[in-house]
Amino acid sequence: MKAIIEKLMVDYQQKHSDYQIQNFIIGSQGSDWAKYNQALREIDARWNQLLGLEDAMELFNLKTAWAWPFGKRAQIRKKQMERNRKSMGREINETKRELQLIVDLAVELKEKIGVTDDHKKIKLEADAWQQKAIKMAGIDLLVNGRVGSTTLNFILSLPKPDQAMVIEHFKPGAKVDPFKMIGL
């Protein structure tokens, strides 16, 4: 059974797939600015996780470097610790893989966004929330035939000029295209 499990585990991926990261964790965020900010949050989380894992591995290696006593109990404990070391190594490698992909995505997004100052960041942030509101309204229109109360409440949380810009997409008399509103 051990050989079968080891053979099957070759396909096991402990963390998120590249596809998940590109299309759901980062890619589903809407605007490039929103994607970039999500990538930065993910980088921060994984970087700190990686540093913690590497510290834990270093401490683990120090702990296991001591001479092992003899006996059956010591042999069992040593096998357990070796399994733990392998598991920690896999987690470190998976975290590095995820981190590298997200860093690559962030660099690509930063190149699209360009240099930012406070004024540009405010504009990009407002645009990101406007796009999110438009997408929410488009989904409501496709699913329910009308903009829902949750979406309307979200839109009303935006500053007045942003509200007006969003509402232009679905106000009475407007040529409403919910597919365009959701980016299709």
Image (cartoon, helix red, strand yellow):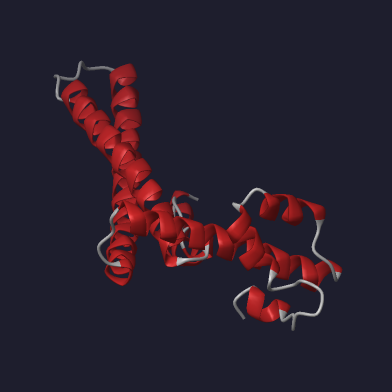
Q: Position of residue 78 (x, y in %)?
A: 28, 27
Image quadrant assignment for residue 144: bottom right
Q: Residue at x 32, y 20 (%)?
A: 72
The answer to whether residue 24 is seen in the rendering is no
Q: Position of residue 79 (x, y in %)?
A: 32, 31
| Identity of the residue furthest to the right in this view | 145
Against 110, is 9 above or below?
above
Observer-nearest of 13 and 128: 128
The answer to whether residue 129 is seen in the rendering is yes
Locate residue 54 relative to residue 84 in the image: left or right.
Answer: left
| Identity of the residue furthest to the front in this view | 161
Locate residue 36 relative to residue 59 in the image: left or right.
Answer: right
Image quadrant assignment for residue 7: bottom left
Observer-nearest of 43 and 29: 29
Q: Position of residue 81 (x, y in %)?
A: 31, 29
Q: Position of residue 125 (x, y in %)?
A: 46, 56
Q: Residue at x 75, y 55 (%)?
A: 152
Observer-nearest of 10 and 159: 159
Which quadrant of the rendered structure holds the C terminus?
bottom right
Q: Residue at x 27, y 67 (%)?
A: 114
Image quadrant assignment for residue 141: bottom right
* Count of picture labels: 0
Observer-nearest of 18 and 62: 18
| Identity of the residue furthest to the bottom in this view | 175
Against 33, is 40 above or below?
above
